[in-house]
Image (tube, rainbow, N blue to C red):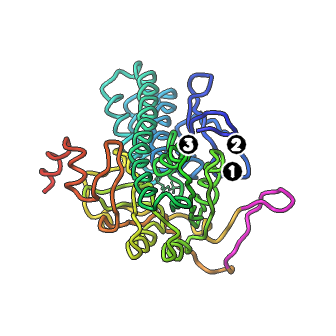
Amino acid sequence: MKVQGVPMRSIWVESDGWSVGVIDQTRLPHAFVKVTLSTADEAGHAIRSMLVRGAPLIGATAAYGVCLAMRQDASDGALEQALTMLRATRPTAVNLHWALDGMRQVLAPLKPSERVAAAYRQAAALCDEDVAINRAIGEHALKLFQEAWDKKGRKGRLNVLTHCNAGWLATVDWGTALAPMYLAHDAGLPLHVWVDETRPRNQGAVLTAWELGQHGVPHTVIADNVGGHLMQHGEVDLCIVGTDRTTARGDVANKIGTYLKALAAKDNGVPFYVALPSPTIDWTIQDGVKEIPIEQRDGAELSDVTGRLPSGDIATVRITPPGSPAANYAFDVTPARLVTALITERGVCPATEEGMLSLFPERRAQRSAAK
Ligand code: MRU
């Protein structure tokens, strides 16, 4: 992706060869600020405070957090301590565990003196894998976009609705749900994206709108309640969202409000697709509503809103009455029955266990053993 025309990723190793650069996503879209992480604690804080966010980027940042921990102390105890601290940063996105399990598998058998170099190699490989996965998801989803455009008789514009930010800011590059948007736009499809604002943290209004704008993709920000109305009036040709954890039978956890969009899509016969990188699949669980841990965050994210004043200053203001409690559920689960199809790096499949196993047959033994 390009920021002001300059190609970059959302996480990188700085020119000193060890510290880790990220974009402070809490400052967008008003300021583009890069931050350098020098310790595992700083990496943990960046994830917890949502300076970086999005399931794949959370995993990548945690992997580099382990690298930074190993630089300070590469003993067995320090490795376990870093893994435990980073694992506890955010509960819903399973990519965090995937990344940390991968780091542990590579580092634990090594001598401490070998761990720093191996950690950086593994974190870099994980980032490259994320980019390749997302690009492949984009290509598979692009075919669905083209089919929808043909079905529409190639008239007007192709209206796609998305929720939250599943773009390059949520990944190392490309994004998952947004990858096909960039490819479709570049291929000349007259794409228009309805961007759900995504309260309470406004990842749609703040991040998705910003990155679509950087790439020149036509888009319109809408309040979270608008999608159903637009679908009733034929203004949405398809929905596509990302996911933080998808179960073995295709139930999908994603940013709070995704479920309501899927319900509205079902009621209106609008295809509802989920872009699903394989590290986001939790093969150990089935029932997403019962088994996926849903993060609850500070109520201040709901009661307070940050924005730019006419003076140009950035200010945070309270919108709720003093004393009104706020409950801030960060994710919800969309049952597989509401998902038209899952789009993975290996292709498109029905949101069923059999559909997923048809693309990932190496998981059949694990699933049979679980039954
Ligand atoms: O709380 P966030 O901003 O980390 O939530 C992000 C999402 O819900 C994304 O849709 C999801 O991580 C998929 S990103 C490719």
Could you classify mark 2 by the number of other residues whose Cα lies within 10 Å: few (under 14), some (14-19), or many (20 or more)? Answer: few
Asked whether 197 or 57 is in front, the reply is: 197
Judging by the rendered image, the residue that carries numbered circle 1 is 27
Identify residue for label 3. Answer: 186
Q: Residue furthest top?
A: 113
Q: Amino acid at mark 2?
A: Val
Mark 1 belongs to which amino acid? Arg
Report x, y in % for residue 93: 42, 53
Q: Nearer the viewer, residue 69 or 264?
A: 264
Q: Is residue 263 above or below residue 152?
A: below
Residue 177: x %, y % from top left: 47, 52
Task: Name the residue nearer the viewer: 321 or 109.
Answer: 321
Residue that numbered label 2 is attached to? 33
**Marks 3 and 1: which is nearer the front?**
3
Can you give x and y, in whole percent of width and height, for residue 7 in the image?
A: 61, 33
- Which of marks 3 and 2 precedes in the sequence? 2
- Under mark 3, the amino acid is Asp
Residue at 52 percent across and 43 percent down: it is 187
Residue 216 visible: yes
Q: Which residues are magenta?
A: 307-320
Specify whether tag 2 is near ligand 1 (CB below 8 Å).
no
Q: Earlier in the sequence, mark 3 or mark 1?
A: 1
Q: Quadrant of residue 105?
A: top left
Indicate the quadrant containing the C terminus: top left, top right, bottom left or bottom right.
bottom left
Q: Marks 3 and 2: in contact by CB < 8 Å?
A: no
> Residue at image x 40%, y 54%?
147
Name the residue rendered at 39%, 56% in the picture: 274
